Image: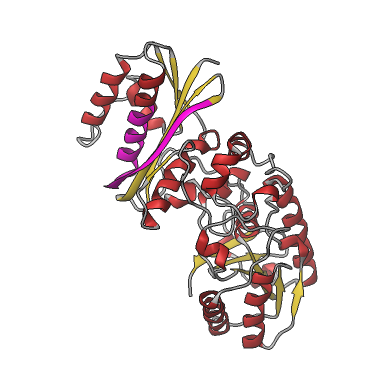
Amino acid sequence: MGWTAEADGGSRGNPGPASYGAALLRDGVLVADRGETIGRATNNVAEYRGLIAALELAREHAPGEPLEMRMDSKLVIEQMAGRWKIKHPDMIPLAARAREIVRDLGRVTWTWVPRAQNARADALANAALDEQKAGRPGLVSSFDATGPVQLADEPPEPPSLFTEPRADAPVEAQGKNPLVGWRGSLHGDPTTVILLRHGVTAHTQRKLFSGTGGEDPPLVDEGVQQARRAADWIAAHGGADAIVASPLLRTRQTAGAVADRLRLPVKIEEGFAEAGFGDWDGFSFAEIMKRWPADLDAWLSSTAVPPPGGESFDAVAKRVEAARDRLLKTHSGRTVVVVSHVTPIKLMVRLALGADMNVIHRMELSPASITTIAWWPDGTPSLRNFSVVP
């Protein structure tokens, strides 16, 4: 395999607060990595900064050695390979700087990879931004004892934090009917599913993994207030006929606020529980990068890989789909509030979009946010809103 480098960058807004992630590997083993904030910039500038950082790692650790440079930005790869012209004035000096470093290396091969295969660099970039947001220096590394801090209750969402659409990020959606918006009563009444993420817990505030089988923390005062605001929003937008909740405490408490407002009982549905994070539960992303680097790399690279002692995203997807089917059968033509977590809600949206599993890494859900999907009797879905915060 030899020496390979991975890089990415992005901004929360375009332009907006930006960062990059870069990693260097030898025969698949991580040698060095780095994530750093770069102030306010565009996605493309951040990607070039990630490229430069990755090349600098290669020059430091493998000068004169052949290198395969991997990025999920087709723009940067094609420009550096000389196949596309560089026209934007912000990128011309960055590309020149990268080429200067390349001269100190051996032969460099430029390889575009799908986003799912660049998860390590994405995670580093997002961790750096989260560090800065938490008031700490926006510089992280797997080899730093302090490391990055990223998680908020559920798994990291590397691409989803870069909220501006990426021109080179393909979207694979297979809707059954492209004219969903034109549907009317001739198709029957849809089943409307209001997906509500639970309010904030202490683990949310500390950015820890918190899944099924872990500590199961309750809502903090802020989370209780969020749940009440969500209940008021649902009541003001037509209410619901039923309430379903994950069995975890924070979702039952959030559902309780909705139940009090709508005067409805709450039914527990195990299928909408958060993923099990096994040995990682209660740890921060930084701690996991330090203690389980190989396991984390594998988990970030494939939705089929579970955390040690935990549950893979593919396994969660199967039980969420089964729970969705039970819901549509039991509550056909009605409106149902489903109080759940980041992973199941993103998987429900993925089902509605008919998208590849990797689309779950391109969404961001706020605590106590509301996402609404309507399923028509013939199975055609319609995503009506996403991550609305009351």
User: Which residue is located at x 70 percent, y 76 percent?
Assistant: 243
Q: Is any part of residue 22 visible from this angle? A: no
Say left or right for 322 vs 275.
Answer: right
Q: Say above or below: 222 vs 114.
A: below
Q: Is any part of residue 253 visible from this angle? A: yes
Say left or right for 83 vs 111.
Answer: left
- Taking the view exactly as shown, the residue that stands out farthest to the front is 145
Q: Nearer the viewer, residue 65 or 343?
A: 65
Q: Give x and y (percent) for residue 190.
A: 67, 69
Give the image's coloring scheme: secondary structure
Question: In this figure, what is the number of numbered marks?
Answer: 0
Residue 370 drawn in magenta: no
Which quadrant holds the N terminus?
top right
- Report which quarter residue 212 is drawn in: bottom right
Q: Say above or below: 290 vs 92.
A: below
Q: Nearer the viewer, residue 242 or 259?
A: 259
Residue 49 drawn in magenta: yes
User: Which residue is located at x 74 percent, y 83 percent?
Assistant: 265
Q: Give x and y (percent) for residue 229.
A: 52, 80
Q: Say above or below: 20 vs 246.
A: above
Say left or right for 51 vs 214.
Answer: left
Q: Magenta residues?
A: 30-54
- Report which quarter residue 358 is drawn in: top right
Q: Give x and y (percent) for residue 37.
A: 34, 45
User: Which residue is located at x 25 percent, y 33 percent?
Assistant: 91
Q: Give x and y (percent) for residue 118.
A: 50, 34
